[in-house]
Image (cartoon, helix red, strand yellow):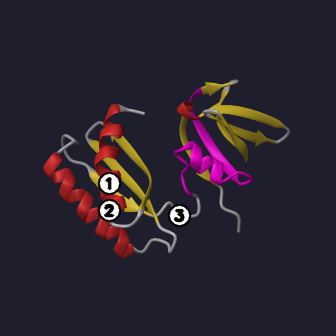
Amino acid sequence: MSGKLTELEAMVVPIVEALGYRCWGIEYLSQGRHTLLRVYIDHADGISVEACAEVSRQVSAVLDVEDPITGDYTLEVSSPGMDRPLFTLEQFADHIGEQAKIRLRVPYEGRRNFQGVIRGVEGDEIILQVDEHEYLLPIDSIDKSNIIPRF
């Protein structure tokens, strides 16, 4: 995890939790002059547009004072949705048996993209079954992962 992401999490998570929501995860994407801070919030009763606006106002106020991001940035606050991103080992463990897409930072066995069923968590690795093969993918090597919703 990058130092900037760790710094932002230290600021944002307490705000989200103080408002009564769970901080599902944070994405910090800095590409040249375009920086995006995306905060995913969750709650047992679901997430409304008003909840996102409330969290956005509070987070924005703290970020304006603390100024951890140099230059212009876009702040997005949203629900993880049905195709929720997975950030932690605990989140993967909570979704055992579900289909997921995982993209790695560097290739593993010649590939970066995997799609299969989450079979478990072992140490700091995700067990993903793709067809008849099980892969152990270290959480630290995962760039992006999402649940594939079933309809």
How far from the left and from the top, in percent, is residue 51? 36, 71
Residue appearing at x 59%, y 38% in the figure: 103
**Can you see residue 90?**
yes
Which one is earlier in the sequence, the residue at label 3 or at label 2? 2
Label 3 to label 2, Cα distance in Å? 22 Å
Residue 60: image location, x then y, percent: 23, 58
Q: Is residue 41 left or right of residue 8?
A: right
Q: Position of residue 3 (x, y in %)?
A: 33, 32
Amino acid carrying label 2: it is Ala
Q: Amino acid at mark 3?
A: Gly
Q: State whether residue 59 is above or below residue 121.
A: below
Give the magenta part as a residue range: 84-106
Find out whether the residues at labels 1 and 2 contact each other: C-beta distance under 8 Å: yes
| Element assignment for label 2 | helix
User: Would you say residue 87 sits in the magenta stretch?
Assistant: yes
Mark 1 secondary-structure assignment:
helix
Is residue 116 shown to the viewer in this render? no
Quarter of the rendering occupied by the C terminus: bottom right
Residue 32 inside the magenta-drawn segment: no
Circle 3/circle 2 CB separation < 8 Å? no
Mark identifier at residue 14: 1
Going by the picture, which residue comes out furthest to the right?
A: 132
Residue behind mark 2: 18
Q: Quadrant of the N terminus?
A: top left
- Residue at the spot of label 3: 81
Q: Residues within 10 Å of mark 3 (few under 14, many from 20)?
A: some
Asked whether, in this view, residue 151 is left or right of residue 66, the answer is right
Kindly identify which numbered label has been placed on residue 77.
none
